[in-house]
Image (cartoon, rainbow, N blue to C red):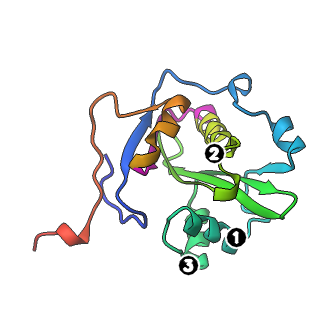
Amino acid sequence: MLLSGITSTPPLSIRRLNKATTVTSQQLTISDEVLESRGFVLRRTTEKLNLDHLNSIFVAVGFPKREPERIRLALEHTESLLWVHDKRSSRPVAFARATGDGVFNAIIWDVVVDPSFQGIGLGKAVVERLVAELLGKGIVNIALYSEPKVLGFYRPLGFVADPDGIKGMVYSRKHKKN
């Protein structure tokens, strides 16, 4: 359960990865080589990540515009991240990150793909690799925040409603009783 926190996106649903699911390089929907041949480069650090370009993707998919300095701060507190660089435009076109305790739990945040690049496997590519990285660190309790309208995207990647029936909660100042 999420104990407290303020979200910057519309109402969310929490999903956990089915613990029986593991991702190996043989199970990737699209290989690194195929991505490279299509002009994409996978990156796992913030080096060369233009935050204004990333912010434009956030806005394009319906997230509120974020202050670049706050994005930078959030990325400094991120356990793992993965983004796709388009060599033709020299811009990020897909992104996902995870925060957590580094041992037991992680939450995947901000999975976004530039709308003009959706439908070609980039979202799956970043999520599959991010999950594989977390599992490789021994982190098996992986939660994901998602808009309800895209839950179907995550199910084939191993995400399910919490099998133990745990429901997440989000702190809201609007409903706080004095």
Spatial CA distance of label 1 from label 3 is: 12 Å
x, y (%) of residue 31? 79, 33
Residue 130: name its quadrant.
top right
Q: Residues within 10 Å of mark 2 (few under 14, many from 20)?
A: many
The residue mark sitting in front, 1 or 3, is 1
In the image, residue 137 lies in the stretch drawn in magenta: yes
Q: Secondary structure at mark 1?
A: helix
Q: Which mark is residue 170?
A: none
Would residue 114 be seen by someone viewing this image from the given angle? Answer: no
Spatial CA distance of label 2 from label 1 is: 17 Å
- Magenta part of the chain: 135-147
In the image, residue 129 lies in the stretch drawn in magenta: no
Can you say which quadrant of the picture contains the C terminus? bottom left
Q: Disc 2 marks which residue?
A: 123
| In this view, 27 is above or below 84 | above
The amino acid at mark 2 is: Gly
Q: Disc 1 marks which residue?
A: 53
Q: Residues within 10 Å of mark 1 (few under 14, many from 20)?
A: some
Q: Disc 3 marks which residue?
A: 67
The residue mark sitting in front, 2 or 3, is 2
Q: Residues within 10 Å of mark 3 (few under 14, many from 20)?
A: few
x, y (%) of residue 59? 56, 69
| In this view, 167 is above or below 24 | below
x, y (%) of residue 103? 51, 40
How many labels sit on residues? 3
